[in-house]
Amino acid sequence: MPFDTSMNVLIVDDYKTMLRIIRNLLKQIGFNNVDEATDGVEALSKLRAGTFGLVISDWNMAPMTGLELLQAVRAEARLKTLPFIMITAESKTENVVAAKQAGVSNYIVKPFNAETLQGKIEKVLTHA
């Protein structure tokens, strides 16, 4: 692998089942240091307190959406270059454009498998 799978990864989703699925996919591709948050507010406080090499966040969450989380991360000096992958069930062009404008590193549309996830992670971590 051309990247460090021992890094801390934060996964963010308000749906516990999805967190479990993403965690299992990450484990399949070698990532074992995975922390999770169930909304953007919790994620942001974990990001501010810890050191993460990658964020994988769902788009549709309350009270803070994945897009709002991304914007908050990009607005902070210490976090602004953090690789950030957005997961969404919607592949609407305007969503992709909004995420790109906000500085997303990559984008995954549900449903996805370990291979897709690994490909996106490789892209963001080897071109960071």
Image (spheres, helix red, strand yellow):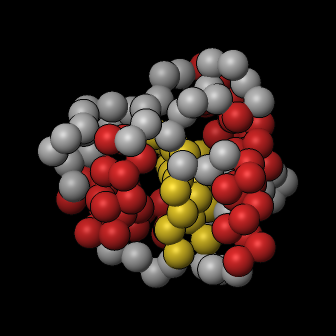
Q: Residue at position x 67%, y 68% from top?
A: 96
Residue 112 location (% of width, % of height): 40, 76
Quick one: quadrant of the C terminus? top left
Residue 107 location (% of width, % of height): 54, 63
Q: Residue at position x 73%, y 24% from top?
A: 76
In front of the other: 29 or 119: 119
Q: Residue furthest right?
A: 63
- Compared with residue 100, is residue 74 higher up or lower down, i.e. above or below? above
- Residue 62 visible within the image: yes
In front of the other: 22 or 4: 4
Q: Is residue 4 left or right of residue 7?
A: left
**Quarter of the view holding residue 14:** bottom right
Q: Residue at position x 77%, y 37% from top?
A: 72
Residue 55 location (% of width, % of height): 52, 44
In front of the other: 1 or 57: 1
Q: Is residue 92 left or right of residue 105?
A: right
In front of the other: 52 or 23: 52
- Compared with residue 122, is residue 20 higher up or lower down, i.e. above or below? below
Q: Residue furthest left?
A: 1
- Residue 24 visible within the image: no
Residue 25 location (% of width, % of height): 31, 62
Q: How many marks?
A: 0
Q: Is residue 75 left or right of residue 43?
A: right
**Quarter of the view holding residue 78:** top right
Quick one: quadrant of the N terminus? top left
- Compared with residue 103, is residue 108 higher up or lower down, i.e. above or below? below
- Compared with residue 103, is residue 119 higher up or lower down, i.e. above or below? below
Q: Residue at position x 64%, y 29% from top?
A: 80
